Image (spheres, rainbow, N blue to C red):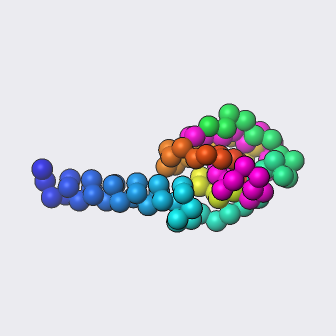
């Protein structure tokens, strides 16, 4: 195995570990933002990898730290109404949501 390939694999493993720790609240991956439903926005197809922004001006895939939390941690890119925001880490979160901004 080449040295470059070994370094890439090690880097990928470390990145995956950091992201997994972020999922458990050990490391915040991005800034918190209000949950879209609190703003009267709609979203659909909430899954572990993507969410569709139905009618918010700007929305992004995120997760909440509890079911009753009103803020989420934004993980994905902001998208306009009618577009999809994809979970870049493809980590399953217990409380996925869409946040707005």
Please give the name of the residue rendered at 56% of the width and 65% of the height, measured from the top-left corner. 28
Residue 92: x and y, percent? Answer: 54, 43
Residue extending furthest toward the right: 40
Residue extending furthest toward the top: 45
**Quarter assignment of residue 52:** top right
Q: Is residue 6 left or right of residue 91?
A: left
Q: Is residue 64 magenta?
A: yes
Q: Is residue 85 left or right of residue 100?
A: left
Please give the name of the residue rendered at 80% of the width and 41% of the height, measured from the top-left corner. 42
Residue 78 visible in this rendered orientation of the protein: no
Residue 39: x and y, percent? Answer: 85, 52
Front position in the image: 73 or 54: 73
Please give the name of the residue rendered at 52% of the width and 60% of the height, measured from the top-left corner. 22
Residue 33 visible in this rendered orientation of the protein: yes
- In the rendered image, the quadrant that contains the C terminus is bottom right
Q: Is residue 91 left or right of residue 2?
A: right
Residue extending furthest toward the left: 1
Front position in the image: 11 or 91: 91
**Quarter assignment of residue 84:** top right
Q: Which residues are magenta?
A: 48-71
Front position in the image: 91 or 87: 91
Residue 87: x and y, percent? Answer: 56, 46
Residue 88: x and y, percent? Answer: 52, 49
Q: Looking at the picture, does residue 79 appear above or below residue 3?
A: above
Count of numbered badges drawn on the protein:
0
Q: Is residue 5 left or right of residue 23?
A: left
């Amino acid at each position: 195995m080449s040295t470059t390939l070994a370094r890439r694999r090690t880097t990928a493993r470390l990145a995956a570990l950091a992201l997994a720790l972020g999922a458990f609240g050990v490391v915040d991956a991005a800034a918190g933002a209000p949950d879209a439903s609190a703003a009267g926005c709609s979203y659909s197809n909430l899954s572990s990898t993507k969410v569709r922004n139905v009618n918010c001006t700007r929305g992004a895939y995120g997760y909440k730290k509890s079911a009753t939390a009103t803020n989420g941690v934004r993980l994905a890119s902001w998208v306009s109404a009618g577009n999809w925001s994809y979970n870049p880490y493809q980590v399953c979160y217990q409380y996925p949501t869409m946040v707005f901004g």
